[in-house]
Amino acid sequence: MTLHFYEKSKRGKVEQVVQLTFDERNRSRGKAMTLSNESIAWFLPRGEYLRHDDVLKSECGQYIKVIAAQEPITKVTSGQPFLLTRAAYHLGNRHVPLQVSEAGLMYQPDHVLDEMVRGLGLVAEHIEAAFQPEDGAYHSHGPEDVHNHKGANGHTPRGLNSHSHDH
């Protein structure tokens, strides 16, 4: 039998854990096996996805914690902060999901991107690690603001009225 989950919860006694890659967490709907080998499926509102440490509540009141699985990623490092900033700019310009930390930048492996950052003078190495990229400036944080793109001044930034969320 598969447990079904339709919402995230901020509280509840976690009974199980599911370990998911970024691609698996980056879906509104999906299926997986918990660490205790139980089948689960989640059906979140369109545009909402899972993050490391989220808790899902099942239709029968069970709670499951989502953790980021170790997966292949490219880690970019440099002793020069300016080079890391420059690489972040170029990767962001290509809309690459990017994890930013004091240790460096991380993204899903791509030989073209690896060559680009090496060409900028940085070190790109393939490692296994949990991957949780930045959400981005206009990411939705829940069903109440899936289509709320208003900035701090209460206005919608230019160009956002005509784009689509159908990814």
Image (cartoon, rainbow, N blue to C red):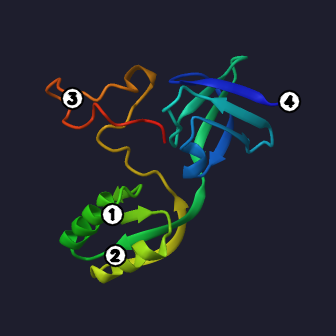
Image coordinates of residue 67 in percent, x first then y, are 58, 45
Residue topped by disc 1: 91
| Mark 3 to mark 1 CA distance (whole Å) | 25 Å
Camera-nearest label, 4 or 2: 2
Q: Which mark is residue 1?
A: 4
| Mark 4 to mark 2 CA distance (whole Å) | 47 Å
Image quarter for residue 147? top left
Q: Secondary structure at mark 3?
A: loop
Q: Amino acid at mark 3?
A: Thr
Task: Work out which residue is located at the far front of the displayed protein and give it.
Answer: 162
Are circles 4 and 2 on residues that touch, CB within 8 Å?
no
- Out of 143 and 165, give the one closest to the viewer: 165
Q: Along the horizontal axis of the image, is 12 left or right of 133?
A: right
Mark 1 / mark 4, whichever is N-terminal: 4
Q: Along the horizontal axis of the image, is 10 left or right of 92?
A: right
Q: Amino acid at mark 4?
A: Met
Are circles 2 and 1 on residues that touch, CB within 8 Å?
yes
Mark 4 / mark 2, whichever is N-terminal: 4
Image coordinates of residue 65 in percent, x first then y, are 61, 36
Looking at the rendered image, the quarter that the N terminus falls into is top right
Q: Which mark is residue 117?
A: 2
- Out of 74 and 48, give the one closest to the viewer: 48
Mark 2 / mark 1, whichever is N-terminal: 1
Mark 3 / mark 1, whichever is N-terminal: 1
Q: Amino acid at mark 1?
A: Leu
Mark 2 / mark 3, whichever is N-terminal: 2
Residue topped by disc 3: 156
